[in-house]
């Protein structure tokens, strides 16, 4: 109960609103259009893989931006140098997912989302915004993964 109290006590409306709005393409192309059938499954998988790659790049960018204020801190240079390097890996993995077979691209995105969530946990666990950020990231990652798994299932 303590975690929920902290999440909602320090509730910041805009990140939650934007985060949940960011789920709309995942949910639409994975679930809703399955019933509306406006797009073919191949088009929907292309759309969701492309959108997933864009969001994955954004998640890496969070770490880039988190590290920028510390760039002149020479005492912690090695830590921040490695964080800068790690922050571009999600973009590269997302880019690769666009050019490989759809099923492999979805699997790559699934693994990448889980890895960046784990890295978020390791990186931000002692920061001031950890509770609400990690709660939000966990929910958003859960729905993104469920959407990707559904498209994967529909493709096989």
Image (cartoon, rainbow, N blue to C red):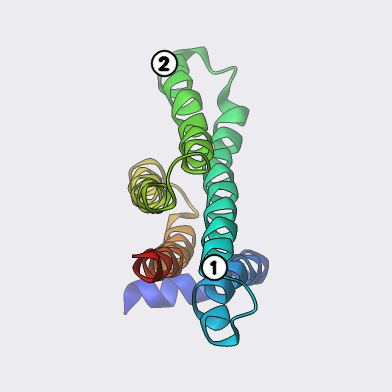
Give neighbour class at mark 1: few <14, some 14-19, many 20+ (Cα, 10 Å).
many
User: Which mark lies nearer to you, 1 or 2?
Assistant: 1
The quadrant where residue 24 appears: bottom right
Q: x, y (%) of residue 149?
A: 36, 66
The residue at 51%/81% (across/down) is 34
Kindly tell me whether residue 126 is visible in this rendering: no
Tell me how far mark 1 sits from mark 2, CA to CA: 37 Å
Residue 21 versus residue 123: which sits nearer the camera? 21
Indicate the quadrant containing the N terminus: top left, top right, bottom left or bottom right: bottom left
Kindly tell me whether residue 72 is visible in this rendering: yes
Q: Secondary structure at mark 1?
A: helix
Q: Secondary structure at mark 2?
A: helix
Residue 108 versus residue 63: which sits nearer the camera? 108
Residue at the far top in the pictured view:
74
Q: x, y (%) of residue 120?
A: 40, 47
Of mark 1 and mark 2, the one earlier in the sequence is 1
Up the image or down, 8 lies above or below 68; here it is below
- The residue where tag 2 is placed is 78
Q: Is residue 22 left or right of residue 147?
A: right
Q: x, y (%) of residue 72?
A: 59, 17
Indicate the quadrant containing the C terminus: top left, top right, bottom left or bottom right: bottom left
The residue at 34%/45% (across/down) is 115
Residue 34 versus residue 135: which sits nearer the camera? 34
Q: How many marks?
A: 2
Q: x, y (%) of residue 109?
A: 42, 49
- The residue where tag 1 is placed is 26
The residue at 58%/51% (across/down) is 50
């Amino acid at each position: 109960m303590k975690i929920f109290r902290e999440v909602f006590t320090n509730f910041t409306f805009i990140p939650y609103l934007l985060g949940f709005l960011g789920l709309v393409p995942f949910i639409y192309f994975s679930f809703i259009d399955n019933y509306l059938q406006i797009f073919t499954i191949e088009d929907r998988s292309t759309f969701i893989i492309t959108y997933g790659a864009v969001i994955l790049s954004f998640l890496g960018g969070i770490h880039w931006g988190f590290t920028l204020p510390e760039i002149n801190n020479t005492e912690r240079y090695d830590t921040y140098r490695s964080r800068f390097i790690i922050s571009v890996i999600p973009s590269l993995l997302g880019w690769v997912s666009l050019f490989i077979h759809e099923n492999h691209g979805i699997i790559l995105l699934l693994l990448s989302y889980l890895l960046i969530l784990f890295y978020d946990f390791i990186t931000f666990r002692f920061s001031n915004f950890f509770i609400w950020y990690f709660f939000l990231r966990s929910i958003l990652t859960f729905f993104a993964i469920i959407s990707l798994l559904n498209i994967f299932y529909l493709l096989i």
